[in-house]
Image (cartoon, rainbow, N blue to C red):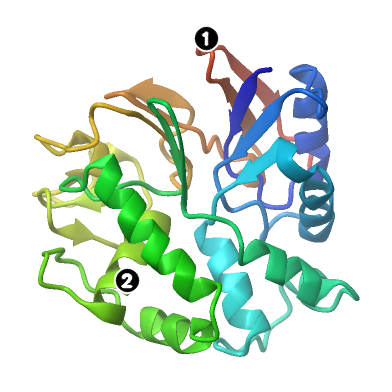
Amino acid sequence: MVTYAIGDIQGCYKTFSRLLKRINFDASSDKLWLAGDLINRGPKSLDILRFVKDLGDSAVPVLGNHEIYLMALHYGVMASEKPHTMHEILNAPDAHELVEWVRTWPLMRVQGLHVLVHAGLIPCWSVQQARREASAIESILQSEHLPEFLAYAYAHQDSSWHEGLQDFERQALALHAFVHMRLCIDKQRLLFGFSGEPKDAPAGSLPWFMIPGRESIDHQILFGHWSALGLRAFANCVALDSGCVWGQSLSAYRLEDGAIFVEASAES
């Protein structure tokens, strides 16, 4: 058995299918780690969800910001007035079944020293603490409190982590870190709203994985979310989002030996 970690697919079903052929993926024995944002912006989000769901235990996705947005739309937390690529999912006959399945996805996966997450881990978190914070959020997302929690999270994007945080305030900040974070000021303070290349980051900020003293440095963190980084391995991290939905490529990283596979975007 081998495990392949794949970056943000974002509805690029044709490219995803070609990448699976390139790596000779065998659903009977191999595993896919999917770094979140399987949907939205690309042309075939519904096809992606149905295909990955049918893979069963062979596919191991984590939640990205676009999956959180799908939940918010489906459960009426966010209004959707303009047509966009989520509508195909929301209007599908199996929409509720699919969203209920997405609700079961975790925010992170850990296998030995490998960690899969969509955006990153706050630098002051150890992997063990990150798992505790993720578990608390996952319990809410799978409960009747999902609508009120997501409404709170979309209305509050606080940026300073401290251990005194409690309840929704704590869980909303943790959620934003898991699915939105790119930059930090220091080990506790996050800076949201930037998506460009690290060299253009605001003065006084650094990518979260470059913050000195990062507590998760003892694990290899595989993440997506930041297409401007492209595919690269550094600081005991692997950035997997190589910008397929923007016409670039979709990438896979084999955990067992670090081999990298790249498929040029085939989306029209």
Compared with 11, 169 (above or below) is below
Residue type at mark 2 is Gln
Q: Quadrant of the C terminus?
A: top right
Q: Is residue 82 left or right of residue 122?
A: right
Q: Which residue is mark 2?
A: 171
**Do we see residue 121 in this rendering?**
yes
Say if mark 1 contacts mark 2, CB within 8 Å.
no
Name the residue rendered at 22%, 73% in the picture: 158
Name the residue rendered at 84%, 79% in the picture: 91
* 3D distance between C-alphas at marks 1 and 2: 35 Å
- Look at the numbered disc 1 and give the secondary structure of its residue: loop
**Do we see residue 194 in this rendering?**
no
Compared with 150, 138 (above or below) is above
Q: Quadrant of residue 132?
A: bottom left
Q: Quadrant of the N terminus?
A: top right
Q: Is residue 267 left or right of residue 177?
A: right
Residue 16, x across and y down, in percent: 76, 36
Q: Quadrant of residue 181?
A: bottom left
Q: How many marks?
A: 2
Q: Quadrant of residue 163?
A: bottom left
Q: Which residue is mark 1?
A: 257
Name the residue rendered at 67%, 57% in the picture: 39
Q: Local crowd at mark 2 within 10 Å, few (<14), some, or many (≥20)? A: many
Residue 70, x across and y down, in percent: 63, 72
Residue 257, x across and y down, in percent: 52, 9
The disc, 1 or 2, on the residue closer to the chain's N-terminal end is 2
- Look at the numbered disc 2 and give the secondary structure of its residue: helix
Residue type at mark 1 is Asp
Mark drawn on residue 243: none
